[in-house]
Image (tube, helix red, strand yellow):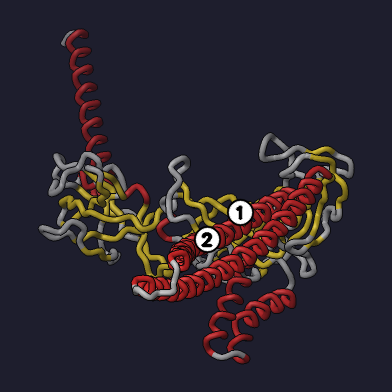
Amino acid sequence: MSTTTRGKRWLLAAAAGVLCCGLLTAGVVALRAKPFLSGAENRDPSTHPSADRTRPSVKTVRPTKQPTLVVSVQELAKVEAFFQADLRARTAGQVKTIYKDINNTVTKGELLISIDAPELQADVDRKAAEVTQREKEVLLAEQKAEIAKAAVDVAFEDIALKKAAVSEAEATCDLRKTRWERFQKLAKKEESVVADAAVDEVKRDYHIAVADCARSEADVRKATAEWRQMKATSAAALVDIQQKKIAVEVARRERDYAQTLADLTRITAPFDGAIIKRNVDPGSFVQNSTTGNSEPLITLARTDIMTVSMKVPDNYAPYVSVNTDAVLQLDELPGILLHGKVTRYSPSIDLKDRTMLVQVDLYNGTDPEYERFVAEGVAAFLAPLGSLPPGPAIVSTAAGRQSWSRHRKGDDDPLPVIPRVSGRAHLDQPHRLLPGMSGQMRLLLRRFNDVYLLPVSAVFSRGGKQYIAQVVDAKVRLVPVRVQVDDGAWVKVAVMNVKEGDLQGELSDLTGNEEIIAAGQGELEDGQAVNPSLEK
């Protein structure tokens, strides 16, 4: 055998050996790797021999049970005085006297600043003199009316006198007529001794009597006309009295108006409180704020009750109500928590920032002061009931309610509460509130017991409605829900059991046994088959 032949055989044998070794090594590796591949297949459904690799794989979770869930919202809050007013001048002039300074307490109606405006007082004096003049004119008109009334009575009596004169003239006329007729008969006799001259004389007397009757009747008519004239004059005098009285009332109102303008030189406190700002000194000239721009002369605030305001986002607004618990933590009072309740809230959402205004009234004093505050209100309501009859008692109670209204901003507002203090860093640390303080306020809106929560990614929107994707028998079921709580990480939802023909449906809670797709539901359809992978 040649050397070349032996070399080829050796190369073939070596190649066969290498091939056998390679096959043996691959078999061992395959046998050793099979358990690990089987475990991977058990973990990944897509690689499991029984899994349908055409179905999408999804990760699912079960609802997480929470024993207690408190829905709350915390936002920036600011402290304001219960009442605060910037008092400005309503008349021009120099500041004459300042009666109160910063930190002085004042009562309603107390004089704070007086302004020197002598022309206004002079106008009041002039108007008062005009009132006196008008009142004297009324007295004069009343006297004239009395005179006119007496003249009416005199004219009436003169009519009776004139009528009596008519009767007398008629009797005289009848007598003279009879005498004239008698003389005429005597003069016609043949042996008459009556001369014609005597008959003519008697005839003349008769005609004079007739004329006297006519004159007397004319006097009656004249007296009657004068009586009517006097009555008209008397009526005119009464009208003049009414006119003069109206002139008096006009003069009084002008005087009162002038006095009102003069009173504007006296700036008084509109409510009980304390001075927190003063911008003028005696001798300062101030402008009329109703006719131009003017700076506040003095600022008054009521600080025995404070109002804390915050803006609640619109998604929490439906849960806010009167008496909702509120916890206030101020930057100026570290380590102190003040507990109160919502006093009032705006029944609408501000379209600018999608928030709702919420306010909490807190009594800003000590416990003994608050007890006296409450006792004052109770006494205002109950005192009339024990000392007056039912009718006056009701009226007096209404008056007491009116007086107590100064402690509330609205008729429906509850009584301001004194805050409960907790979390003090030091027991003796003061917690009196001041206007302008700021911090955070948390509203405890709603409490749920034994609730089930889902990750916020488990809820998605489709067609303007919210759904969760539940896996039942390896198929997707889109369930409409209503989000009740959303804190950005977890949500509490209520399942909407919508029946045919219903618009809203009934709400029910999750049971905890549901298998919910945690994310990526946007591409899935109702009834679609999937490969679920349940995670904790």
Q: Residue 136 carries which label?
A: none
Outermost residue on the left side: it is: 500
The residue labelled by disc 2 is 226
Q: Is residue 149 above or below residue 502?
A: below
Q: Could you say where residue 245 lies in the image, as x and y percent from the top left?
A: 62, 59
Q: What residue type is labelled 1?
A: Gln
Between residue 76 and residue 130, name the one nearer to us: 130
Q: Give the alpha-carbon distance from disc 1 to disc 2, as whole Å.
A: 93 Å
Q: Which amino acid does label 2 sit on?
A: Glu
Between residue 197 and residue 52, name the one nearer to us: 197
Q: Could you say where residue 397 lies in the image, as x and y percent from the top left?
A: 57, 80
Could you classify mark 2 by the number of other residues whose Cα lies within 10 Å: few (under 14), some (14-19), or many (20 or more)?
A: some
Residue shown at the point (77%, 70%) measured from the top left = 427
Q: Could you say where residue 499 lies in the image, as x and y percent from the top left?
A: 13, 60
Chain-order first, disc 1 or disc 2 = 2
Residue shown at the point (59%, 67%) measured from the top left = 149
Q: Could you say where residue 72 lies in the image, as x and y percent from the top left?
A: 49, 59
State left or right for residue 21 relative to residue 433: left
State left or right for residue 213 relative to residue 380: left
Between residue 130 and residue 241, name the one nearer to us: 241
Q: Is residue 339 above or below residue 310?
A: below
The quadrant of the rendering that contains the C terminus is: bottom left
* Foreground tag (1 vs 2): 2
State left or right for residue 277 relative to residue 208: right
Q: What element carries label 2?
A: helix
Q: Residue 440 carries which label?
A: 1
Is residue 489 at all visible to an observer of this figure? no
Q: Is mark 1 on a helix, strand or loop?
A: strand
Residue shown at the point (25%, 31%) measured from the top left = 21
Residue shown at the point (48%, 55%) measured from the top left = 346
Is residue 377 at all visible to an observer of this figure? yes
Tag 1 near tag 2, CB within 8 Å: no
